[in-house]
Image: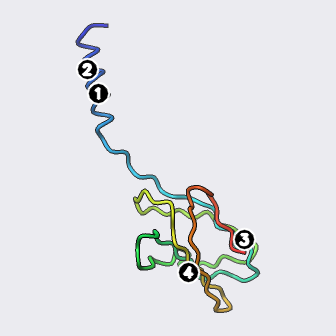
Amino acid sequence: MTKQKLAAIAMAAAIGFAIPAKAQDLAFMLANDSGYDLIEFYAAPSDISEWEEDILGQDILRSGDAVRVIIADGREQCTYDLRMVFADGDVLEDTANLCETGSYTIE
């Protein structure tokens, strides 16, 4: 290889390392083993003091069902506060490292 080719490869590698990596979407399985239908589900990074929008929207996660949730917020965050609202009016809040587990089961 010529010195010019080696210099070009070295420069391309340096540029590639200089570009910051894009944060990946956080995906996890949400399972409802609670015995009650889940009508609202919120997930907010633990360092944020307000709940973000209801992830389920108009959908309901029936007891015994599971769904894949994708949080595409561009953050490099793993620990989320979770808020679950059930059809019977009960509310459950928890904190979980969703990167570590890859899933969350409501029991």
| Residue 105 pos. (x, y %) | 68, 68
What residue sits 37% from the left and 45% below the top? 21
How far apart are the alpha carbons under marks 2 and 3?
54 Å
Secondary structure, mark 2, is: helix
Mark 3 = which residue?
Answer: 65
Determine the residue located farthest toward the bottom in the rendered image: 89
Relative vertical location of residue 19 with respect to residue 2 in this rendering, above or below: below
Upstream in sequence: badge 1 or badge 4 = 1
Give the SS element for disc 4. Answer: loop
- Residue picked out by circle 2: 8
Image quarter hosting the N terminus: top left
Mark on residue 12?
A: 1
Confirm or deny contact between disc 1 and disc 2 (CB under 8 A). Answer: yes
Please name the amino acid that badge 3 sits on.
Asp
Mark 2 surroundings: few (<14), some (14-19) or many (≥20) residues within 10 A: few
Q: Amino acid at mark 4?
A: Gln
Residue extending furthest toward the top: 2
Tag in front: 3 or 4: 3
Do tag 1 and tag 4 residues touch (Cβ < 8 Å)?
no
- Relative to 101, residue 56 above or below: below
| Label 3 vs 4, first from the N-terminus | 4
